[in-house]
Amino acid sequence: MIAGIETYKNRPTRAEISFENLRNNYGIVKSFIKDDVKIMAMVKANAYGHGLYEISSELLNQGVDYLGVAVLEEGVYLRECGITAPILVLGPINTDQIAEFIKNDIEITSSSTDKSAAIAAVAKEMRKKALVHLKVDTGMERIGVHWYHAERFIEKSYDFESMTIKGIFSHLAKSESDPGFTNQQLDRFDAILDSMEKKKLIPELVHMANSAGIMNFPASHYSMVRPGIMLYGYNPNGYRPDQSFEGRSLKPVMTLKSKVSFFKVVPANTGLSYNHTHVTKNQTRIVTLPLGYGDGYTRLLSNKGEVVIRGKKYPVVGTICMDQCMVDIGMEGEAYNGDDVLLFGDMDGCTIPLESLCDKIGTITYELLCGISSRVPRIYRSL
């Protein structure tokens, strides 16, 4: 890769990141929880595509207590950038990574008694204390000890003198769609907590609520919550543009834009792009944009996506290429080289909800946001 390509600001395709909207969304998170509940901001996967360091820094400035990431490398990167706040890696670990966790003061998820033993052994050898959160599986079936075996796991983990148990947590599987199962998960988790409290084995931090849990299940808040998608402006319960929380609405933090790079008149019955998946019915005007699936504008939006140019919506036509795509503006449409083009988000009073693109191709906002590639510069705006 060319050195500096990730920060080249003059590329016509860019993702504009609104700190103002991020602050708005953080305020909405706080409106759902009590004052003594801590917040772990989920910034994994490059902060859902928004920029790991920049988003983490802004959220810490706003008062976030913890940062949550998925892999060790994300935590190490934040440490190398000068972030000193508590960081938890919530994903599974390999035992050969443990020393790096401890060296960088990054908190570790233990998902089994064997993992706890391995963490303790490395910490003892390093003559340091490992900071650990214990993962209990209450129904996600991903990682963690099943709730019906969790007591022994927790007790054994507390026995290791070279570990400090900072937290215990679980993960909600269906908090946006299934209240019955979510309440069952909460009952399972509460039973473990009740049992451990009697044995005085409750750590400082107990956490379970994701964005949907924060919004839908106050009982899931415990002593810390883990907002993710709602921080970035999307309702985990589905697209509800008119829904407000104490007079405020969630606002998407990212807007994806490009510019018109080429313009031509194309005759009727002309095939466009690879394999001619679109054939013009009439003579029309086609503009080309300098972005494609290599930038994260997925090929699945071929002949399905839409854009805004000069205040009007037009369809994406033909197969989206790695680096370019085409738009049909019709014979009445107006566009000039260098015109701004909206792919999703807001521009000059026009909106293309990211959710509408997701609905067209059967995916979720998380996936499209995370897919915006590193060669698309992020432009950060405070106002």
Image (cartoon, rainbow, N blue to C red):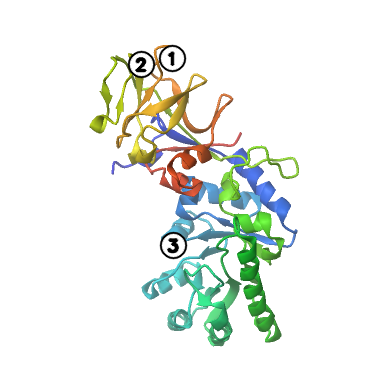
Label 1 crowd bin: few (<14), some (14–19), many (20+), radius 10 Å? some
Element at label 2: strand
Contact (CB < 8 A) between labels 3 and 1?
A: no
Task: Work out whether mark 2 precedes mark 3 in sequence or the reverse, and give the earlier one.
Answer: 3
Q: How many marks?
A: 3
240 over 82 or under it: above or below? above
Marker disc for residue 333? 1
Marker disc for residue 218? none
128 over 171 or under it: above or below? below
Q: What residue sits 47% from the left and 42% below the top? A: 358
Would residue 284 be found to the left or right of residue 239 on screen? left
Residue 54 appears in view? yes
Nearest-to-viewer mark from 3 and 1: 1
Task: Work out whether mark 1 precedes mark 2 in sequence or the reverse, and give the earlier one.
Answer: 2
Residue closer to the observer: 128 or 205: 205
Task: Work out whether mark 3 precedes mark 1 in sequence or the reverse, and give the earlier one.
Answer: 3
Contact (CB < 8 A) between labels 1 and 2?
A: yes
Label 3 crowd bin: few (<14), some (14–19), many (20+), radius 10 Å? some
335 over 181 or under it: above or below? above
Q: Which residue is mark 3?
A: 71
Q: What residue sits 56% from the left and 66% below the top? A: 171
As shown in the figure, which amino acid type bears the numbered disc 1? Gly
Q: Which residue is mark 2?
A: 285
Element at label 3: loop
- Percent x, y for residue 205? 64, 70
As shown in the figure, which amino acid type bears the numbered disc 2? Arg
The quadrant where residue 382 appears: top right
Element at label 1: loop
Would residue 124 be found to the left or right of residue 242 on screen? left
- Percent x, y for residue 280? 32, 21
As shown in the figure, which amino acid type bears the numbered disc 3? Val
Q: On the rendered image, what quadrant is the C terminus found in?
A: top right
